[in-house]
Amino acid sequence: MINRCTLNVKRAILFILLPAFSTICYGQQDSQYTQYMYNTMSVNPAYAIAKDHTSFVALARTQWIGFQGAPETQTVSFQTPVGYSGFGLGITAMNDILGPSRETGIEVNIAYAVYLSKKGSLAFGLRVGGRTLSLDWSRGRFQQPDVVFNENINNRFLPTLGAGLYYYETKWYAGISVPNLLKTDHYDDSVESLAVEELHYFLIAGYVFDIGNTIRFKPAILSKVVFGAPVSVDFSVNVLFTDRFVLGLAYRWNDAISVLTGLQVTERLHMGYAYDLTTSNFQNYNSGTHEVFVKYDIFKQPKLKSPRFF
C-alpha cells in the first residue's frame, strides 16, 4: 500500500475534510487489520505452513465510518499444506481503497517448515505477486489545484516480493516479516513523485494460557515499523470459551481501542467481528471502524479436541 507520509505536503489537500490528512498519513501504511490473528498470512508469508489443514478466510474492513474517502479493505486468502512435504502454499487476493486511489492484487505465498524439536517448528516463507494501482483525481475536491492532479493512473502494475520467518509451538508463536521488499515509486517519472512505497517490517508474537479445561487466554502483539512513520503497536487479548465463543479487547497505540467477538458456528466454520473506536484527535471526524471475517477449514483428519488458538 502507498506510504502516504511521503506525499508532498503542499499538495496534500485532496478532500474537503483533509485537516485530518496527517492522521491518514501516519496511520495508514500497509493494509491494516484488527483481527490480524485470523489473517496472519497477510502480514507473514511463512504462516502458509503453520496450519495442518486447508483454510479459507474472507475479511472486510470499513474504516472511519462517516469520513469521506476513508480506507476500505477486502481480503480473501487460501492456505494448505502440500501433502507431508513440509511445504505450504497460500494465495491472497486484496482490494484496498483510499480516497481517489484503488489498489488490487494477488500474491502467492510459499513456506517450508523445519522441525527443530518435538515441540517447535521454524517456517521460512516467500511471497511473489503483483498489484495494480488506479487513481482518479475526479473523486477528490481540491484547494489550489495542481497540474499533477490532471494525470490519472489506470492499472499501473506494481510487483511484490516478500519474505518472513515464523516459529511456532503448541502454546506460543513469534514471527518477523517484510511483506514487500520492493521499494516502488507510484507515479510517473514525468512528475514529482508523490508517493513511494517504503519497506514495512512486522513483528508478531502470542502465547496461549489454559485456564481450567474450558477457557484459553491469549495475549498477543503486532508491531509495524515503516520508515517515515511512527511505530504502530497492536496489543490484544482474546479469550476462548469451550472452544466455541471468543471475546477480546485490543489497543492500537495512540490510535484505537477495539472489541472483538467470534463464534465457532460449526466444526469447520468460524465467524468474527471487531469494532474500533478511534482514540486520537481524529475521533471527532468518524464513528469508528467495522471489520468482519469468515473462516472455513477443511480437515483431512478428525479435528483435534483442543486445536491451536492461533
Image: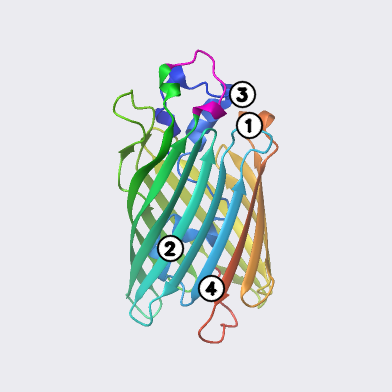
Residue at numbered disc 3:
17
**Residue reaching furthest top?**
144
Residue corresponding to mark 2:
91
Residue 30 highlighted magenta (yes or no): no
Badge 4 element = loop
Give me the C-alpha separation between circle 2 and circle 3. Answer: 37 Å
Q: What's the distance in space between the residues labelled 4 and 3, CA to CA?
A: 44 Å
- Examine the rendered structure and indicate whether residue 115 appears above or below residue 155: below
Q: Secondary structure at mark 1?
A: loop
In the rendered image, residue 74, in percent from the top left (x then y), is placed at 55, 51
Residue span colored magenta: 137-146
Q: How many marks?
A: 4
Residue drawn 63% across the image and 72% down it:
269
SS at badge 2: strand
Q: Please name the residue shown 42% across and 55% down the image.
A: 106
User: What residue do we see at 52% from left, 21% from top?
Assistant: 13
Q: Earlier in the sequence, mark 2 or mark 1?
A: 1
Type of the residue with mark 3: Leu
Name the disc covering residue 237, or none.
none
Pointer 4: residues within 10 angstroms few (<14), some, or many (20+)?
Answer: few
Residue 245: x and y in percent read: 70, 68
Q: Position of residue 29 (x, y in %)?
A: 46, 39
For the residues labelled 1 and 3, the Cα–Cα distance comes to 8 Å
Q: Is residue 310 visible?
A: no
- Along the polypeptide, which appears first: circle 2 or circle 3? 3
